[in-house]
Image (cartoon, rainbow, N blue to C red):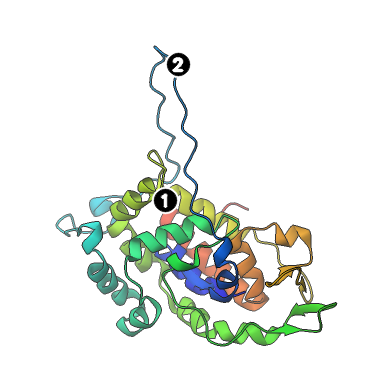
Amino acid sequence: MNKSIIAVAAAAVLAGVGGWYYWARQQQRHAVAVPAPAASVAPVGAPPSAPPAIHYPVPSGNASGISASAALPALEDSDPSLREALGTVIGADAVKAMLSANDLVRRIVVTVDNLARAKLPVDRLPVPGPSGAFLVAGDAQHATIDPRNYARYAPYVDLLRRLDMHALAGVYFRFYPLFEQVYRGLGYPDGYFNDRLIAVIDLLLATPQPQGPIELIQPHVQYEFADPKLEALSSGQKVLLRIGPDNASLVKAKLAELRAALTASPPPR
């Protein structure tokens, strides 16, 4: 029951990243691949269907503040360039500590897409999990999330608090063709990754925040939320509940900043 949304924010944010490790690790054996949209067959003689409308187009060239001469590496060679670009935003040391995995673009896209689903594929997350074990207060009959867990996410929260979301959006825009390439390769040939990212951010921003301790049950090995409505939330929304209300408020505020930077507009109310 782990893996902080802060690094999640850094994955969504990168566009994105993690604090979900413990919980996701418990559920790893149950994780499933990202489902591809069902294929449809057009009637004989019917005109080809138009591709889905793009709601949040990504600026290109000078409109995004990116030099037209900036060379974009091939996907398989993109890790060094992406790490260097992110280092200008969050610092080289933070990149080294938080993004130790390879194949970053693919990991970010898969993580963002699955934040709106029931499970996170733990083996594809781009960041390490927080230190320490998940703590539960009470007993098997009356268990709640122990507030001491919230301190485990402090490094992610501190990093996120310092992030310049407009600068981060600039890196995202520069590498966007690679994010789009991966997203379409997941089974969305007509998909638009930026629309998916904004939809996921909006879902996270709509996460409810219960008052008081959050009760848990343990029907099997891993803990679940006792409230069926909370248990039915997406994996990303559950992360926001597990990191504590203060951390969640900070994450939501920074996600709203990122959304504005990506769309030039605030989130809907």
Measuring 36% from the left and 59% from the top, which residue is drawn there? 106
Q: Kindly indicate whether the residue at mark 2 contacts the one at mark 1 (C-beta within 8 angstroms).
A: no
Disc 2 residue type (three-letter) = Pro
Quadrant location of residue 3?
bottom right
Kindly tell me whether residue 265 is visible in this rendering.
Answer: no
Q: CA distance from mark 1 to mark 2?
A: 31 Å
Lateral position of residue 111 relative to residue 243, left or right:
left
Task: From the top left corner, tell me how far across and down residue 124 is, in percent.
Answer: 43, 65
Disc 1 residue type (three-letter) = Asn
Tag 1's secondary structure? helix
Kindly tell me whether residue 92 is visible in this rendering.
Answer: yes
Numbered mark located on residue 43 in the image: 2
Q: Residue furthest left?
A: 69
Measuring 41% from the left and 49% from the top, which residue is drawn there? 193
The local crowd at label 1, few if under 14, some if 14 to 19, many if 20 or more residues have their Cα within 10 Å, is many
Asked if 63 appears above or below 104 in the picture, the reply is: above
Quadrant location of residue 66?
bottom left
Task: From the top left corner, tell me how far across and down residue 14 is, in percent.
Answer: 40, 65
Foreground residue, 176 or 118?
118
Measuring 37% from the left and 67% from the top, which residue is drawn there? 168
Numbered mark located on residue 103 in the image: none
Asked if 102 appears above or below 47 in the picture, the reply is: below
Task: From the top left corner, tell me how far across and down residue 5 is, in percent.
Answer: 54, 71
Task: From the top left corner, tell me how far across and down residue 165 is, in percent.
Answer: 42, 68
Residue located beneath label 1 in the image: 194
